[in-house]
Image (spheres, rainbow, N blue to C red):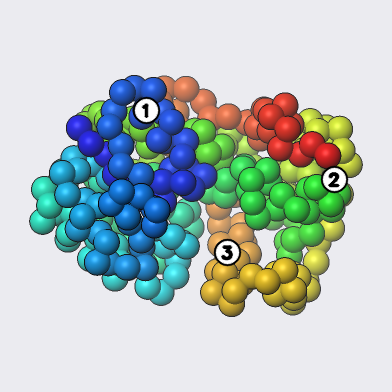
Amino acid sequence: MTILLTAGHGKTGRRIAARLDALGVPTRIGSRSGTPPFDWTDPATWADALAGVDAAYVAYVPDLAVPDAPKAIETFTAEAARQGVHRLVLLSGRGEAEAEHCERIVQANAREWTIVRCSWFSQNFSEDYFLDDVLGGALRVPVTDVREPFVDADDIADVAVAALTDPRHAGQLYELTGPRALTFAEAAEAITAASGRTVRFEPVSLAEYEAGLRAAGYPDEVIGLVTFLFTEVLDGRNESVRDGVQRALGRPPKDFAAYARDAAASGAWAE
């Protein structure tokens, strides 16, 4: 079988690609530089990217919460059906009504579907969003004591690979979290313990956070998305732990402390 990985160079996409390559499964990396190219902002690229594909990993960029997402997912799934793609695995967001709308679109249009609904990624602290804060020694975010059961991107990739390659996962909705919920202050403490560098937690106002993003050159649409995630999603609705990793893989999810130790050992937070 051939599998299309949309957002194939992203946090989960590149991990899935490596696992499928190790299994000897042919993959097509969905990216603007791919052959053929794939671009979520250009529907004209979708047909060629889906041609001859048996299954697809659907990771919409920038996020299923943005207004354009439902139309894009509806158009993409219709094209996938027309091309004879029989299995879709959707990366979804936990606690997002907009994402759940997109889930229903996939469920209605795909011959076989699996929903992989995720909480915030642990790797946000070591690969992008919060990396500069960690390296600067102060995790400055507009939250206080809200807890989040951060999920490891490697767990997401393992579940996605299982769903893409094994029909027994068809029709399943896996809600993935880590094994415990932490505050951002506790996450900073775990990173400090693992890395040996002091990382303080410093809550800031949303206005301060937005101003910092704007000063760093982030576009308005990214700032709007981050604001949505901090104000409407990170409000305590996702504090509970779910068993999606255990159900899908038969093993517990990776704890944040173990993630932090591995990230530190990889040099993610090195000077």
Secondary structure at badge 3 equals helix
Secondary structure at badge 2 equals loop
Q: Which amino acid does label 3 sit on?
A: Leu
x and y percent of residue 123 in the render?
61, 43
User: Which residue is denoted by mark 2 in the rendering?
Assistant: 199
Viewer-nearest of discs 3 and 2 = 2
Residue at the image position 85 percent from the left and 45 percent from the top: 199
- Which residue is nearer to you in this view: 181 or 63? 63
- Which residue is nearer to you in this view: 192 or 100? 192
x and y percent of residue 205 in the render?
78, 71
First along the sequence among labels 1 and 2: 1
Q: Say left or right for 236 vs 157.
A: right
Q: What residue type is labelled 1?
A: Asp
The answer to whether 32 is drawn above or below residue 243 in the figure is below
Q: Which numbered dot is residue 21? A: 1
User: Which residue is denoted by mark 3 in the rendering?
Assistant: 229
Residue 91 visible at all: no
Label 2 neighbour load within 10 Å: few <14, some 14-19, many 20+: many
Residue at the image position 32 percent from the left and 55 percent from the top: 37
First along the sequence among labels 3 and 2: 2
Q: Say left or right for 8 vs 143.
A: left
Secondary structure at badge 1 equals helix
Q: Say left or right for 135 vs 87.
A: right
